[in-house]
Image: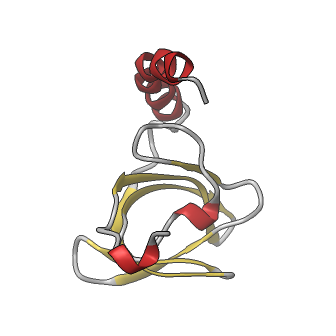
């Protein structure tokens, strides 16, 4: 990738984050927490009040990185701090958006 193209994209990262934040419904309170498990059923969070909570996800759940760019679900790791927006669907809540707020430290053995 050319360095000039990469540098040209950085000013727009803030706009992506603003766009992602503007889609939230005003009456929906986001859920913040530390990812303690990431499996097929969803994400398990350690929330601010020291309770564990399951965030049910689906194929329509959107994921955003620290910089506001869309990422894949596999890019969210145990130890990351996230913000999740949930939508009530009958008696259940479905996670519609997950944004990584802070990355967990990565070990040197995990890099190639």
Pinpoint residue 44: horizontal percent, then vertical percent.
47, 80
**Within the image, what quadrant is residue 33 found in?**
bottom left
Q: Identify whether 2 is placed above or below 35.
A: above
Observer able to see residue 34: yes
Lateral position of residue 109 relative to residue 60, left or right: left
Lateral position of residue 58 relative to residue 76, left or right: right
Q: Identify whether 63 is placed above or below 37.
A: above
Identity of the residue furthest to the left in this view: 49
Residue at 52% from the left image edge and 26% from the top image edge: 19
Q: How many marks?
A: 0
Which of the colour schemes (rainbow, by chain, secondary structure, one colour) is used? Answer: secondary structure
Depth order, front residue of 96/35:
35
**Within the image, what quadrant is residue 80 found in?**
bottom left
Pinpoint residue 41: horizontal percent, then vertical percent.
66, 82
Pinpoint residue 52: horizontal percent, then vertical percent.
37, 84
Residue at 45% from the left image edge and 36% from the top image edge: 26
Pinpoint residue 96: horizontal percent, then vertical percent.
62, 53
Q: Identify whether 27 is placed above or below 42.
A: above
Identity of the residue furthest to the right in this view: 59
Residue at 45% from the left image edge and 70% from the top image edge: 111
Observer able to see residue 94: no
The quarter in which the N terminus is drawn is top right
Lateral position of residue 32 relative to residue 77, left or right: left
Residue at 75% from the left image edge and 54% from the top image edge: 60
């Amino acid at each position: 990738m050319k360095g000039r193209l990469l540098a040209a994209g950085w000013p727009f990262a803030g706009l992506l984050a603003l766009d992602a934040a503007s889609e939230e419904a005003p009456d929906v309170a986001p859920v913040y927490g530390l990812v303690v498990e990431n499996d097929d059923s969803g994400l398990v969070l350690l929330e601010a009040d020291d309770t564990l909570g399951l965030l049910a996800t689906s194929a329509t759940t959107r994921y955003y990185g620290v910089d506001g760019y869309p990422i894949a679900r596999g890019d969210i790791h145990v130890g990351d701090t996230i913000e999740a927006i949930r939508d009530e669907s009958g008696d259940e809540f479905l996670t519609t958006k997950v944004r990584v707020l802070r990355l967990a430290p990565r070990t040197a053995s995990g890099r190639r």
